[in-house]
Image (spheres, helix red, strand yellow):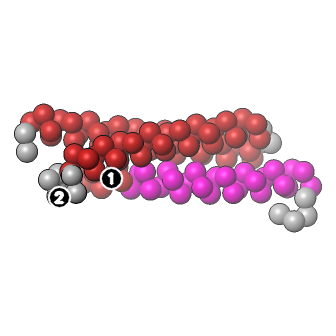
């Protein structure tokens, strides 16, 4: 693999990791805000998490483009780690939305939570 492709590959992986980590942090932050009853701020953090997930997905797509679906790029531990971070960030984002809704209903005194 040419050196410029290796560098681009490594850069895309690192960007994927950064975006996935930022998404996870924002989703956890949203949960903490909701726990304290700050629902508007929690929704803002969830929106930030969604933007980071979208950016991470773009990085993932760039990696797939580099590979061209033919196994040109090596599956390294750092690539697997980055994919794991993205998957976890997406899961946390989804669960955070559901848990925040439960906090909101509980705060409103709803009995159908």
Q: Is residue 86 left or right of residue 65?
A: right
Secondary structure of residue under mark 2? loop
Closer to us: 85 or 94: 94
Earlier-in-chain disc, 2 versus 1: 2
**Can I make out residue 21 in this image?**
no
Q: Residues within 10 Å of mark 2 (few under 14, many from 20)?
A: few
Residue name at image x 76 percent, y 37 percent: 40
Measure how far apart labels 2 and 1 are at the Cα level.
21 Å
Residue 37 screen position, x and y as percent = 80, 42
Residue holding disc 2? 70
Residue name at image x 47 percent, y 55 percent: 88
Toward the left, the furthest residue is 2
Q: Residues within 10 Å of mark 1 (few under 14, many from 20)?
A: some
Tell me if residue 50 comes above or below residue 41 in the rendering.
Answer: below
Q: Quarter of the image containing the N terminus?
A: top left
Residue 71 screen position, x and y as percent = 17, 58
In the rendered structure, does residue 65 fall within the stretch colored magenta? no
Residue 44 screen position, x and y as percent = 67, 36
Q: The magenta stretch spans which residues?
A: 84-109
Tell me the number on the disc at residue 81. 1
Closer to us: 1 or 108: 1
Magenta span dominant secondary structure: helix
Residue name at image x 74 percent, y 44 percent: 34
Marks 2 & 1, CB-CB < 8 Å contact: no
On the image, which quarter does residue 43 sit in?
A: top right
2 vs 1, front mark: 2
Q: Is residue 102 left or right of residue 95?
A: right
């Amino acid at each position: 693999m040419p050196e410029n492709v290796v560098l681009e590959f490594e850069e895309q992986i690192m960007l994927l990791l950064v975006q996935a980590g930022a998404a996870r942090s924002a989703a956890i932050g949203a949960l903490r805000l909701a726990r304290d009853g700050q629902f508007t701020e929690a929704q803002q953090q969830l929106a930030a998490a969604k933007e980071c997930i979208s950016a991470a997905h773009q990085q993932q797509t760039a990696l797939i483009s580099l590979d061209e679906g033919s196994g040109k790029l090596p599956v390294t531990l750092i690539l697997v780690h980055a994919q794991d971070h993205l998957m976890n960030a997406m899961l946390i984002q989804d669960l955070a939305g559901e848990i925040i809704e439960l906090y909101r209903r509980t705060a409103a005194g709803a009995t159908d939570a």
